Amino acid sequence: MTVSDTNVWRHRTPRTQLGMFMFWLIIVALFVFCWNMMTERTMWVFVYDAPTAAADLASRAWPPRWSYMSQLWAPLWDTINIATLGTLLGIIMAVPLAFLAASNTTPSRLILRPFALFCIVATRSINSLIWALLLVSILGPGLLAGILAIAFRSIGFIGKLLYEAIEETDINQVEAITATGASQGQILNYGIVPQVMPAFYGISVFRWDINIRESAILGLVGAGGIGAQLQASLNVLAWPQVLLIILVILATVVLSEWVSAKVRHAII
């Protein structure tokens, strides 16, 4: 038997190699096209001067105006309330939608499930700032617009992850409870809910952690919280105050991350 008579193993067939080459060629061409589009109207004189401008801005912002801290406690508390109340309201609205969207718990696959999926996708696809802009124009500036913006954004996040967790429940437990002659409510209460509760707790706490970060900037569009103080300081070019607010937001986010991790570890 000669060497030419044996089959030589190759990592990819010639057709696959050609396909991979064409794929990467398209990716490179798309990158070049997007880069040209992005830099077409870029004023490079400002880009070259950016390090000098950044250093000048940092020199004017340092040191932080610590005396301004007394005026940040109330807006900071408002920010935490926006995130907390918005998360709770989002949970209240997301849980029914998740059970309607899950294929193994929905009472109607033709009407209610598509409706629930549409609500989840629609709320998840719109950013919190856009929700806040819309709600501020409807309800006026204030905390209510911020709470509702956080809630609407949370519906899609919580609903999607929760309905996926519902669909991944162990069918054997459900079948065992069904075999006892349990009603649909009992099957849901004893066969599905206990399985998804750990995921529900983790999703809820994780979303609250995210909402702390998002609610900190909703004030930029009039939805209350510490973002309103940031906007006011930016308007008058009070850079030491801006730096202090940024540091406070950073500390709040770090603290919320620590609290979120501790709560998830304790619950799950």
Image: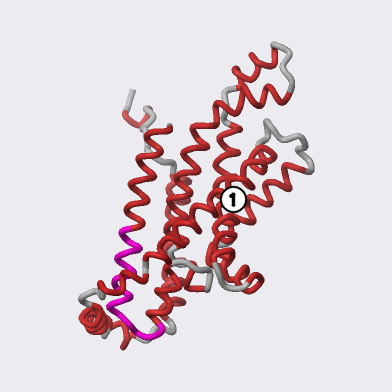
Query: In the image, what residue occupies the spot 39% across and 29% down?
Result: 7
> Can the viewer see residue 26 in this picture?
no
Instruction: Determine whether 138 is above or below 21 in the image.
Output: below
Assess disc 1: are there few (<14), some (14-19) or many (≥20) residues with their C-alpha within 10 Å of its C-alpha. Answer: some
Q: Which residue is mark 1?
A: 89
Q: Is residue 178 magenta?
A: no
Which residue lies at the image location 46% right of the left edge and 66% below the top edge? 225
For the point 58% across and 55% down, the residue is 151
Q: Is residue 107 above or below residue 210?
A: above
Between 100 and 238, the one nearer to me in the picture: 238
- 73 or 89, which lies in front? 73
Q: Is residue 248 magenta?
A: yes
User: Could you say which quadrant of the image residue 124 lies in?
Assistant: bottom right
| Residue occupying the point 73% across, 46% down | 114
| Residue extent of the magenta highlight | 235-251
Q: Quadrant of residue 172 in the image?
A: top right
Q: Whole-percent x and y of residue 255?
A: 33, 52
